[in-house]
Amino acid sequence: MSTADQKSRVPRKKFARLFFTP
């Protein structure tokens, strides 16, 4: 899964924001 790669690249807050955009 590329999710783990993205988590390591960007912080968890930023990562969640990009994935959980309103």
Image (spheres, rainbow, N blue to C red):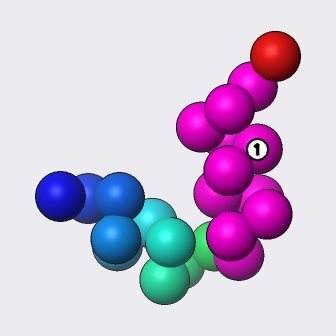
The residue most toward the top is 22
Which residue appears at 35% of the width and 58% of the height? 3
Give the x, y percent position of residue 22. 81, 16
Q: Nearer the viewer, residue 20 or 5?
A: 20
Which residue appears at 50% of the width and 72% of the height? 7
Verify whether residue 9 appears in magenta: no
Left or right: 21 in relation to 3: right
The three-letter amino acid code for the residue at tag 1 is: Arg
Which residue appears at 45% of the width and 66% of the height? 6
The answer to which quarter of the image holds residue 14 is: bottom right
Above/below status of 19 relative to 2: above
Left or right: 8 in relation to 5: right
Verify whether residue 12 appears in magenta: yes
* Predominant SS along the magenta part: helix
Which type of secondary structure does the marked residue at label 1 adopt?
Answer: helix
Residue that badge 1 annotates? 17
The answer to which quarter of the image holds residue 12 is: bottom right
Above/below status of 16 relative to 14: above
The residue most toward the left is 1
Which residue appears at 75% of the width and 25% of the height? 21
Above/below status of 1 relative to 5: above
Circle 1 residues within 10 Å: few <14, some 14–19, many ≥20 = few
Give the x, y percent position of residue 19. 59, 37
Q: Which residues are magenta?
A: 11-21
Q: Quadrant of the N terminus?
A: bottom left
Give the x, y percent position of residue 2. 26, 59
Say how many tags the image has: 1
Left or right: 19 in relation to 22: left
Give the x, y percent position of residue 5. 34, 73
